Image (tube, helix red, strand yellow):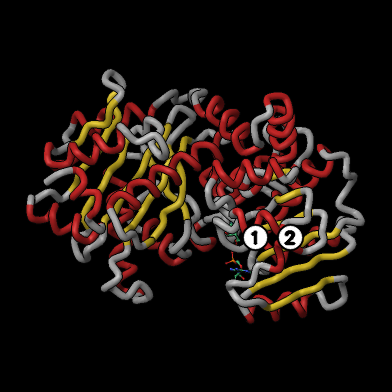
Amino acid sequence: MTDQNLLAMNPQELNEYLNEKDIKKFYLIYDDKSSQMTASHPELQPLADFISNDKRDFDNHEGIFVKLSSAYNSLLAVFVHRTDRGQSAGGTRFWHYSTTESFLRDGMRLAKGMTHKNALAGLWWGGGKGIITHDPSIDKTNPDIRTLLYREFGEFITTLRGCYVTAEDVGTNVRDMAEIFSRTRFTTCIPFKFGGSGNPSVPTARGVVSGIEAALNFLNMGEIESKIIAVQGLGNVGRPLIKFLFEKGAKKIIAHDIDTYNYEIAEKEFENENVELKLVDKSDTSIFGMECDIFSPCAVGAILNPETISLLKSRIVCGAANNQLEDPVRDDKLLAEKNVLFVPDFLTNRMGIVNCANEQYGYVNDDPYIEKHLQKDWEYSIYQMAMKVFNQSKETGESPAKAAVKIADELSFIEHPIFGHRGRQIINSLVEDEWHKN
Ligand code: NAD
């Protein structure tokens, strides 16, 4: 079996291959001495070698842990990127992958993204990500199947002894989080009825407002008052965002959605405001070309590409959607060339993780640990961090996204003030105790 073969297999085929070898769990761990990834099983060393040699998504990730689902052809995986600031934290994605390579790349990329998001937010968390691979032959809407998978995932996280703490992500819902919580303490984003923090969309929308205000200030464009903003997506974040923008005196909002239900709610909610709402087809890109001051992507990721960027008429792009650039290097450059100030999404949409990050410390009204992220004066607030990023980008000539990653990287190596680099110690203990055999 060559590395190419393993990487080209889809996760279901990898699952079958591992079963044939009687491998139920495996890990790929970063070895500080050799600066290489090492696999728990010799048969899987080609995967570790592929990762060690990768320049795009691999960034000395501390560990990747994978377990086979006992009932379905799914892989349960945890990607730990960096734990200097604290336990690795990030949501669990339930997603279909056509190859093992795309599964590994996605996990590494998303875990690294969480390191950056958490560090820029000044949270004492490292970065990680969970993935449950979806086997297309099973019905992912079946509640019994989901219950089993998410309970198994919770049990799996427990075995990792706290080097990873999970949360909600694409494909995972509140009910799934309750199933995870029934099997592990290492989770945030638990339902409200179990003491969780509930829906973070409203604080997320407020975070986007902070990002917009910083960008306007940096460009000497004044305040939100009298501005025209185009919003893509009228969902949980898009609608409160529009409400806040009107409260701040926005002149007009243009907003598109593809979903009749959300469109109709928005139509009713903003019937007395100066809005131009449109129900569009998925392939419709007209929102990008609207005459406006700010374009705010609040729908899905990867929407900024050469075609859509060429349509933009705004000076600022700032929204909640994750991973807005289809190709981070190419599209970042294109935006800069077009003189559009891009507010990195992982900076502005942090309130989702901020909202649930400290659930275990309880709740107070107008929680200062949440509110400070939305104020203008705290050094790690969205506003201050955005200004820092823009200024650094101006000084160095790098794009804001690059500057943000650089600042985040530096911050991510600051060790937790009480527990130090404990995540790495936990991983070392797992290896010492032969986690993969138990
Ligand atoms: P949501 O699913 O409630 O709303 C998204 C809306 O976008 C939906 O109404 C959908 O129909 C619409 N949409 C999808 N494709 C579209 C298209 N091509 N054109 C126009 N509209 C389209 O999601 P949300 O919670 O509002 O989150 C919005 C984005 O922000 C997502 O990318 C999400 O990952 C990200 N985000 C959300 C939070 C949060 O707290 N909710 C936190 C961080 C990041």
Q: Identify the residue at image location x=71%, y=51%.
A: 317
Q: Quadrant of ligand 1?
A: bottom right
Q: Closer to the N terminus: mark 2 or mark 1? A: 2
Q: Which one is nearer the viewer's eye here, 30 or 308?
A: 308
- Is residue 350 visible in the rendered structure shown here? no
* Contact (Cβ within 8 Å) of mark 2 with mark 1: yes
Q: Identify the residue at image location x=64%, y=45%.
A: 334
Marker disc for residue 241: 2
Q: Identify the residue at image location x=65%, y=36%.
A: 399
Whether the residue under disc 2 has CB within 8 Å of ligand 1 = no
Q: Residues within 10 Å of mark 2 (few under 14, many from 20)?
A: many
Identify the secondary structure beneath mark 1. loop
**Quadrant of the drawing holding the C terminus:** top left
Q: Report how far apart the C-alphas of labels 2 and 1 lie in the structure.
A: 9 Å
Whether the residue under disc 1 has CB within 8 Å of ligand 1 = yes
Question: Picture coordinates of residue 245 (x, y %)?
Answer: 81, 58
Q: Is residue 287 left or right of residue 135?
A: right
Q: How many marks?
A: 2
Q: What residue is shown with label 1?
A: 298
| Type of amino acid under label 1 | Cys
- Is residue 166 visible in the rendered structure shown here? yes
Q: Is residue 10 left or right of residue 226?
A: left
Residue 145 position by quadrant: bottom left
Q: Which one is nearer the viewer's eye here, 312 or 424?
A: 312
Question: Picture coordinates of residue 92 (x, y %)?
Answer: 41, 54
Q: Identify whether 264 is placed above or below 121.
A: below
Question: Picture coordinates of residue 73 (x, y %)?
Answer: 22, 63
Q: Identify the residue at image location x=69%, y=41%.
A: 336
Q: Residues within 10 Å of mark 1 (few under 14, many from 20)?
A: many
Q: Identify whether 322 is placed above or below 179.
A: above
Q: Which one is nearer the viewer's eye here, 192 or 374?
A: 374
